């Protein structure tokens, strides 16, 4: 029977989905449908699942993400009705995540409330409280509806009451009550007051509970709400009992008993007799207490028997009716089946044969197509791999060619600039020397009693001459660097000891290195390389000088140097590797990419020509080697040079 129900609802779901797919719903219609389904009775458990799928399908068709939130919420309610709280939490979390992404505050608040409810069912109160606090905070920020905020406060009060935190519970009940009063929601006010009265009575705070019970009595009498009047009279009786006002308590119990008989409700009548027994016991009337307790037990048993007999009779009647109806249906179906069996048998056999033939033919055609497609795909993949490999090699060759042409062009330009600048600088230098000699002659020819004006004029001229000479010397240094960078040395390469070149460069910087950094030499066994010792000395000197300056920025001089300069050499396959590491200030990616460009420098104006690393690059290329630099700000730098082992 259970399997039949599953198939029935599955079939119904397919019919509904098929029907709804014929006409797309608008976003407003889907929103309205979700709102209606939310308030379905919990007995319609499968309806939540069915409508969830319908809303999801329609939302996907019109790309309505908010509809997916409603679909996830309905799916969570479906699992909640089935007491599958872990799965319900999973769907409500999906709703919360999507609502946050879409910025749908109403949907997000609903998801937080639903999650708090599920954790409450699981008695995970702290998690439930956390979700409600989050919902209240968000509601205050986004201006949520007051009625929703009141519900949050009421539920939070219930959670605190159940965890033995009456003061906190009363605080949140009071906040909810304030909102209900502002909305003038009489029914809502009464519901909150019932919770407050029950909380205070549990704490035996009868005077504090009295105003709430008085309000509820007046409101329910005015509305003619008989069921809630029973609760009000019972609560009033408990308050009088707590105050030892036994006669007043008995009067309220008589009123509660009259209401219970008027409803009628055996359960409420029996509960009233139980409270009579408690009252009699407190009054010391144990005889009546015993009689009331017997009456309570008798009504309780009769209520159970009446309900049980009623349910049994209803079930028996339903069973007999269903049985007769089922027999009639089976008889009719059997007659119709016998008539249709012969008529349909031939059709079914023919259709089966036709379908089998079509299936075999379709399978054969698809098999051939898949086989051909597999071959074509293999060929295309092979061609694609060849093209990608060729494209990669062309790209590498293009990059190398562009870089070589760029450095060659820069070298030619640099050589021309150095030549053109050198001649006028030599001319200016010669003229300055002549001017200095003339000034000396003029000073000697002046009378012994020189006036102050002439003496100041001479000293100013001498100062200007010195400044011009410093400028000439600076320009000559730049020209010398340009010539070194652009020079095509025709000297033949010869076997060179890299360790000797490294040590020579370090010895020249010994004064600059003192008290700034310590040197770590990690020399391996390497062969001689074909090179020019002078050029290699200049290469290493420039690299060491840059490293020492970078270390000085991050680690000033001290008695115990904090800087570190490490030089390591290794033989690597058919090459020789030189690594130079420092723990200086390092450089960013933009600087690292431009480090070998002529005239590019990060130093202040007048402190660097920007040719040092360009010259290093030219020397490395001249030796058929390669150079790479790895660095990051405040992480130092590592320079790797790979020399070919041609010796």
Image (cartoon, rainbow, N blue to C red):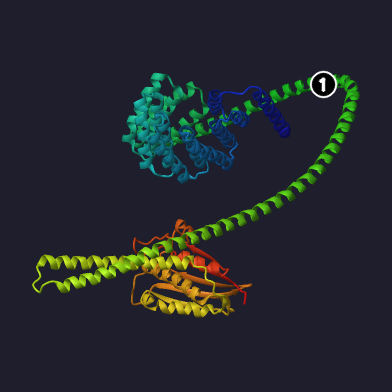
- Give the answer, above or below, for where 422 lies relative to 234: below
Alpha-carbon neighbours of circle 1 within 10 Å: few (<14), some, or many (≥20)? few
Considering only vertical position in the picture, is 64 above or below 616? above
Residue 428 shows up from this direction: yes
Q: Quadrant of the N terminus?
A: top right
Depth order, front residue of 167/302? 167
Q: Nearer the viewer, residue 178 or 431?
A: 431
* Quarter of the rendering containing residue 625: bottom right
Number of marks in the rendered image: 1
User: How far across and how far down the image is residue 231, in percent?
Assistant: 43, 29
User: As drawn, is 29 to the left or to the right of 319?
Assistant: left
Residue 28 picture location, percent across and down? 53, 23
Write down the residue under mark 1. 333
In which quadrant of the rendered view does residue 43 lie?
Answer: top right
Instruction: State the residue in front, 489 or 35.
Output: 489
Task: Give the x, y percent position of residue 399.
Answer: 58, 56
Q: Is residue 244 visible?
A: no
Image side of residue 82 versus residue 552, left or right: right
Q: Residue at x 86, y 31 (%)?
A: 358
Where in the figure is residue 106, as x and y percent of width and height? Answer: 46, 32
Using the image, determine if residue 576 lies above or below residue 101: below
Image quadrant containing the C terminus: bottom right
Viewer-side residue, 72 vs 208: 72
Label 1 SS:
helix
Q: Residue at x 79, y 19 (%)?
A: 328
């Amino acid at each position: 029977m259970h399997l039949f129900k599953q198939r029935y609802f599955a079939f119904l779901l397919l019919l509904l989905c098929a029907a709804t797919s014929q006409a797309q719903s608008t976003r407003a219609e889907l929103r309205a449908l979700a709102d209606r389904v939310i308030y379905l009775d919990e007995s319609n458990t499968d309806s939540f699942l069915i409508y969830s799928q319908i809303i999801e399908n329609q939302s996907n068709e019109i790309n309505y993400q908010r509809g997916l939130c409603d679909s996830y919420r309905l799916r969570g309610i479906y699992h909640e009705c089935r007491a599958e709280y872990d799965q319900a939490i999973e769907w409500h979390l999906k709703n919360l995540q999507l609502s946050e992404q879409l910025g749908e505050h109403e949907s997000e608040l609903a998801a937080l409330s639903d999650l708090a409810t599920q954790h409450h069912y699981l008695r995970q109160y702290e998690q439930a409280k956390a979700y409600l606090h989050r919902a209240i905070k968000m509601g205050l920020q986004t201006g949520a509806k007051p009625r929703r905020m009141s519900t949050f406060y009421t539920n939070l009060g219930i959670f605190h009451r159940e965890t033995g935190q009456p003061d906190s519970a009363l605080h949140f009940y009071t906040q909810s009550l304030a909102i209900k009063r502002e909305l003038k929601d009489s029914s809502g006010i009464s519901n909150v007051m019932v919770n407050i009265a029950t909380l205070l009575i549990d704490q035996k705070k009868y005077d504090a509970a009295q105003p709430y019970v008085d309000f509820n009595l007046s409101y329910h009498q005015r509305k003619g709400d008989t069921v809630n009047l029973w609760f009000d009279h019972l609560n009033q009786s408990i308050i009088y009992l707590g105050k030892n006002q036994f006669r007043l308590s008995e009067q309220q119990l008589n009123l509660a008993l009259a209401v219970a008989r008027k409803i009628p409700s055996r359960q409420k009548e029996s509960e009233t007799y139980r409270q009579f027994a408690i009252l009699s016991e407190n009054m010391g009337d144990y005889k009546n207490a015993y009689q009331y307790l017997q009456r309570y037990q008798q009504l309780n048993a009769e209520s159970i028997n009446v309900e049980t007999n009623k349910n049994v009779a209803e079930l028996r009647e339903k069973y007999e009716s269903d049985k007769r109806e089922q027999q009639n249906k089976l008889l009719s179906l059997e007659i119709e089946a016998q008539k249709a069996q012969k008529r349909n048998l031939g059709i079914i056999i023919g259709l089966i044969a036709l379908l089998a033939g079509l299936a075999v033919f379709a399978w054969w055609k698809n098999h051939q197509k898949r086989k051909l497609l597999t071959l074509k795909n293999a060929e295309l993949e092979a061609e694609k791999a060849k093209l990608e490999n060729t494209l990669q090699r062309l790209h590498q060759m293009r990059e190398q060619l562009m870089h070589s042409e760029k450095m060659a062009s820069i070298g030619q330009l640099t050589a021309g600039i150095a030549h053109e600048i050198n001649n006028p600088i030599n001319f200016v230098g010669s003229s300055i020397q002549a001017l200095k000699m003339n000034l000396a002659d003029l000073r000697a020819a002046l009378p012994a009693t020189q006036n102050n004006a002439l003496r100041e004029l001479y000293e100013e001229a001498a100062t200007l001459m010195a400044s011009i000479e410093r400028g000439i010397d600076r320009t000559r240094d730049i020209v010398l660097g340009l010539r070194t960078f652009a020079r095509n040395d025709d000297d033949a390469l010869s076997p060179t000891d890299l360790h000797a070149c490294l040590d020579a460069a370090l010895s020249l910087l010994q004064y600059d290195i003192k008290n700034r950094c310590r040197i770590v030499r990690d020399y391996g066994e390497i062969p001689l390389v074909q090179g020019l010792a002078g050029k290699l000395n200049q290469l290493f000197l420039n690299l060491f000088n840059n490293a020492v300056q970078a270390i000085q920025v991050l680690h000033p001089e001290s008695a115990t140097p904090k800087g570190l300069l490490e030089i390591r050499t290794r033989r690597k396959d058919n090459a020789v590797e030189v690594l130079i590491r420092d723990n200086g200030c390092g450089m960013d990616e933009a600087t690292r990419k431009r480090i070998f460009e002529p005239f590019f420098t990060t130093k202040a104006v007048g402190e660097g020509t920007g040719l040092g690393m360009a010259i290093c690059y030219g020397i490395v290329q001249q030796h058929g080697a390669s150079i790479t630099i790895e660095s990051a700000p405040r992480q130092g730098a590592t320079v790797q040079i790979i020399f070919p082992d041609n010796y």
